Image (cartoon, helix red, strand yellow):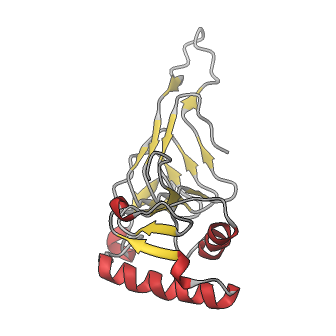
C-alpha cells in the first residue's frame, strides 16, 4: 500500500515487497480533544530503493540504493546503499554489508554483453540489434535498441525485440528505464 496524501517522490527501480505500507501522513486522533499526532510530510524515495516485504515506512527520505529488510518499521531517514532491519529499524550495514557493491563500467559492459548473447541465443534474436553505448550521442535513427550503460536507459520502441529483452532482464538481471522521448 502506498499512501501519498503528504506527497511522494520516487526514483526508478523502486521495489516495494508484498504487504508493505508506505505512509506520508498521520491522521486519526481528535485534535479538538488534544491529539498531537496529525501530520502530512512528503516521502522522498531515491533510485534502486528496496522495501523487501512487510515493511511499514513513515514519511522519510530513503536515499539511493537503500534497503529495508522484511518486517522493518522505518521511522528515520535511510542513507545511501545502507541496509536496515528491525522494529524500529536500525542500520545493519556494518554487519551484513551494503545492498550494492561497486561495479565499474567495463565490468558492466562485459556482463551486459554476455546477457545479450544469452538472450539472443535463447530467443533467436540478432545480437547486432542491441547496441551498448556510453553516451546518448551514439544513438542513430534506426530500429536498433540502444542501451546506455552509464545512465541505465534504453531506446524504447515498443517492438517485439525490446519488449522481449525487458522481460528477459526483469526482475533481477538488469533494470533499465526508457530514455527521454526527446532523444534522437
Residue 8 or residue 165, whichever sits in front: 165
Q: Is residue 179 left or right of residue 94?
A: right
> Vertically, is 102 above or below 6?
below
Q: Tell which of 152 and 12 is nearer to you.
A: 152
Image quadrant where residue 66 sits:
bottom left
Quadrant where the N terminus lies? top right
Q: Position of residue 36 (x, y in %)?
A: 50, 20
Residue drawn 53% across and 51% down? 73
Q: Judge left or right: residue 107 versus residue 184.
A: left
Q: Nearer the viewer, residue 160 or 40?
A: 160
Q: Give the total number of marks visible in the rendering.
A: 0
Q: Residue at x 55, y 76 (%)?
A: 129
Residue 54 placement, left or right of 12: right
| Residue 26 % position (x, y) | 57, 29
Q: Is residue 45 above or below residue 93?
A: above
* Residue 160: % across, % down: 70, 69
Say above or below: 179 vs 27. Answer: below
Question: Which residue is rendered at x = 50% and y = 47% of the image?
Answer: 181
Quadrant of the rendered structure where residue 126 is? bottom right
Which residue corresponds to the image point at 62% horizontal and 73% vertical from the top-left? 165
User: For this rendering, which residue is in front, 118 or 36?
Assistant: 118
**167 left or right, relative to 15:** right
Residue 166 drawn at (x, y percent): 62, 69
Amino acid at each position: 500500500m502506498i499512501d501519498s496524501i503528504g506527497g511522494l517522490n520516487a526514483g526508478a527501480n523502486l521495489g516495494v515487497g508484498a504487504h508493505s505500507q508506505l505512509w506520508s501522513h498521520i491522521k486519526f486522533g481528535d485534535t479538538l480533544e488534544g491529539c498531537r499526532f496529525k501530520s502530512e510530510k512528503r516521502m522522498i524515495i531515491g533510485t534502486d530503493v528496496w522495501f523487501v516485504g512487510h515493511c511499514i515506512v513513515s514519511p522519510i527520505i530513503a536515499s539511493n540504493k537503500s534497503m529495508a529488510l522484511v518486517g522493518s518499521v522505518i521511522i528515520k531517514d535511510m542513507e545511501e546503499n545502507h541496509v536496515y532491519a528491525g522494529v524500529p529499524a536500525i542500520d545493519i550495514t556494518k554487519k551484513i554489508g551494503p545492498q550494492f557493491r561497486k561495479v565499474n563500467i567495463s565490468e558492466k559492459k562485459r556482463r551486459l554483453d554476455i546477457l545479450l548473447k544469452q538472450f539472443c541465443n535463447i530467443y533467436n534474436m540478432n545480437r547486432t540489434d542491441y547496441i551498448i553505448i556510453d553516451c546518448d550521442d551514439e544513438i542513430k535513427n534506426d530500429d536498433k535498441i540502444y542501451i546506455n550503460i552509464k545512465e541505465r536507459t534504453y531506446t524504447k520502441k515498443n517492438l517485439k525485440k525490446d519488449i522481449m529483452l525487458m522481460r528477459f532482464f526483469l526482475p533481477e538481471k538488469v533494470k533499465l528505464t526508457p530514455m527521454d522521448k526527446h532523444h534522437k
